[in-house]
Image: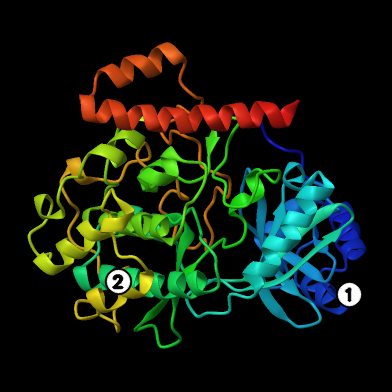
Amino acid sequence: MSVTQVDRETFLFNLRQRGLVSSRDCRNVLERLPNTDRGRGVARALVENGLLTKFQAELLLIGRTAGFLLGQYKIIDQLGQGGMGRVYKAIHQAMNRVVALKVLAPHLVKTTKAQKLFRREVQAAARLIHPNIVTAYDANEIQGRHYLAMEYVSGPNLDQLIRAKGPLKVGAACEIIRQAALGLQYAHEHGMVHRDIKPANLLLQRSRNKDSFLVKILDFGLARLHAPEAPAGTIVINENLVMGTPDFLSPEQARSLHKVDIRADIYSLGCCLYVLLTGQVPFPGGTTLEKLIRHSSEDPETVTHFRHDVPEEVVAVLARMMARDPADRFQTPAEIIPALASFAVIASTPWDSATHPVPEKGELSAEDTEQGQSGELASTLPADMSVTPMSASGEGSLMPWSEMTREIRRHSRKALLVAIGVLAGLLAGILFALWMMQ
């Protein structure tokens, strides 16, 4: 259904009310335009002259007069939206600094306890000043809207990149993971665990000379906002959602609500390396429970099944990162850095370093991981900022008990024990969520 657009005079009145364009600049544009009653012609001219963004123009054309300012921030574009709220590209007017502005969904900060947790988590994230972590600049509340202002990153996230370009060359993939490990190590030294490392939360920033890049880890400090009443260290299952993404979730994070440490992030980072090298998640297809069980009981198809140019040493690093037992993994991200250093190509450009597409079996489908923005590389933040549904294939609700038991019986005795552990963790989370809603 089409939306009725305002006429020229209404458009200009709304424009003046918002103060988005100076009177002189607007007059200069209008003098060159043919006389028309339609607002769209004026909007198009202002956009072409760089005085309005397309986002601002579209809102004005449908009669919107609010949503352009949030305190000192002028909103110029929307980058994404989801269960956590909306993310905008904005300019801090006093500092003339471009930021990514995350406006949190009201339900995340609806209680005093949740608001205190938000402030505490943001303060912790603000201490993470590192080249490989998206910097948190500012957090506040204005007229009931809580927001977080972050460093704006102009490149794509890895989910978008792989969808558009396919698997990367080994050197570029190793350099991306090496840089991410640098950021994770810094966070680890400051006592923080991310809990949701995945390609969509790893952003790429081009260098000015465009022959190298920086990896930026997104969303430190916001992981536990999905369940603000949860005690520290808790992995929460609430309203059919799991903290973490099933395609990148460590076995211990799926089984237990407690005691997740940096080694869980290392496992998830290994899953990201797998995607960069193969173009698919470690365990594609299947239900959520099947994915969780396979992470806990199986090894994924080796990357050499998809390509033959990956050195044995890199294959070994990947296997150790994705070891099912945390004790068998690298114990800190710092240990990953030298293991990949000799294979990483620092002066690389991932945009141009993709390999030939892998066979259909290895393609990264929308059913296997969280959706990006249809391969669009212009966006700098994940389109869906929400916590990921338990099944990325659309099976977001928890399975009925009968279906769960049928799934468990299909697996071996060893997998049965694993499944029972996973199921116990899920049920504990459900009971906790029900208790909190009373």
Determine whether label 2 and label 1 are within 8 Å by CB: no
Left or right? Give the position of 359 relative to 161: left
Left or right? Give the position of 399 relative to 226: left
Residue beneath disc 2? 336
Report helix, strand or loop for mark 1.
helix
- Identify whether 266 is placed above or below 422: below
Quadrant in which residue 101 is drawn: bottom right
Quarter of the N terminus within the rendering = top right
Q: Residue furthest left?
A: 308
- Give me the C-alpha separation between circle 2 and circle 1: 57 Å
Q: Residue furthest top?
A: 402
Which residue shows up at 45% across the image and 27% down it?
395
Quadrant in which residue 129 is drawn: bottom right
Q: Nearer the viewer, mark 2 or mark 1?
A: 2
Q: Where's residue 201, x and y in %?
A: 48, 59
Residue beneath disc 1? 23
Which residue shows up at 20% across the image and 45% down it?
362
Please state which amino acid type lies under the numbered disc 2. Ile
Quarter of the C terminus within the rendering = top right
